[in-house]
Image: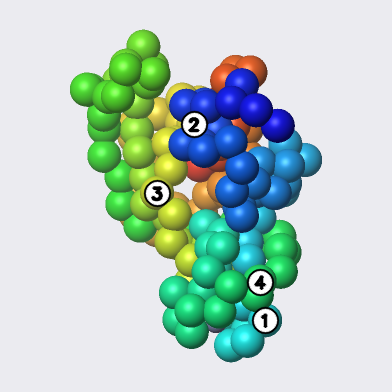
Amino acid sequence: MGFEKFGKEGYVSQTKITPMLSYLKKNQLPATVCQKCKRTWFPPRADCPNCKSNITEWTTIDGTCRLVTFTEVHFAPPQFQSDTPYFLGVAELKGGFRVFAPISGKISRDMLKPGRQMVLRPTTPTADHTYYLLEEL
Ligand SMILES: [Zn+2]
């Protein structure tokens, strides 16, 4: 593996969380489970923030979530500027994980309310970006 994905999927060519991309491409939400203290982390962590162990295993989590809050973005980083305006949300998944993610353009402003049930789904909108979106349940 070289640097063909530099600036697109990560800042270095190889990292301990590289498997995350393969899970997203399989339409799964990846998390890591610390093998020492048994805590689950989403987004995945190569090293456990709780006990500092680097012995983790990959798992997947359910994307069902509840919208906590959201904002409308008018000025974005260059790679997302053509998508503006769009919404970003904070949602809480089962297990208490909180995620900050774009909200699908299929959801209008008047449909967005804190507490709304949503689902976090991996998506591949272009060949250059792999990430996830908050969508209708
Ligand atoms: Zn741990």
Q: Position of residue 5 (x, y in %)?
A: 59, 26
- Visible residue check, residue 41: yes
The CA span between labels 2 and 4 is: 31 Å
Q: Are marks 4 and 1 in contact (CB under 8 Å)?
A: yes
* Residue at mark 2: 104
Indicate the amino acid at tag 4. Thr
Residue wearing tag 4: 56
- With 121 as the anchor, is 104 left or right in this view? left
Which comes before the other along the chain, label 3 or label 4? 4
Q: Is 111 rendered above or below residue 59?
A: above
Tell me the distance, in whole angstroms, between the alpha carbons under discs 1 and 3. Answer: 26 Å
Residue 133 is at least partly visible in this image: no
Quadrant position of residue 53: bottom right
Q: Residue furthest top?
A: 82
Q: Amino acid at mark 2?
A: Ser
The amino acid type found where label 1 is placed reads Gln
Question: Regarding mark 1 in the picture, which secondary structure is present there?
Answer: loop
Marks 2/1: CA–CA distance:
35 Å
**Residue sitting at 31 percent across and 52 percent down?**
69
User: Residue 104's spot in the image, x, y percent?
Assistant: 49, 31
Q: Secondary structure at mark 4?
A: strand
Residue 137 is left or right of residue 108, and the answer is right
Residue indicated by mark 1:
35
Would you say 43 lies left or right of 22 here?
left
Name the residue beneath numbered marker 3.
100
Label 2: which secondary element: loop
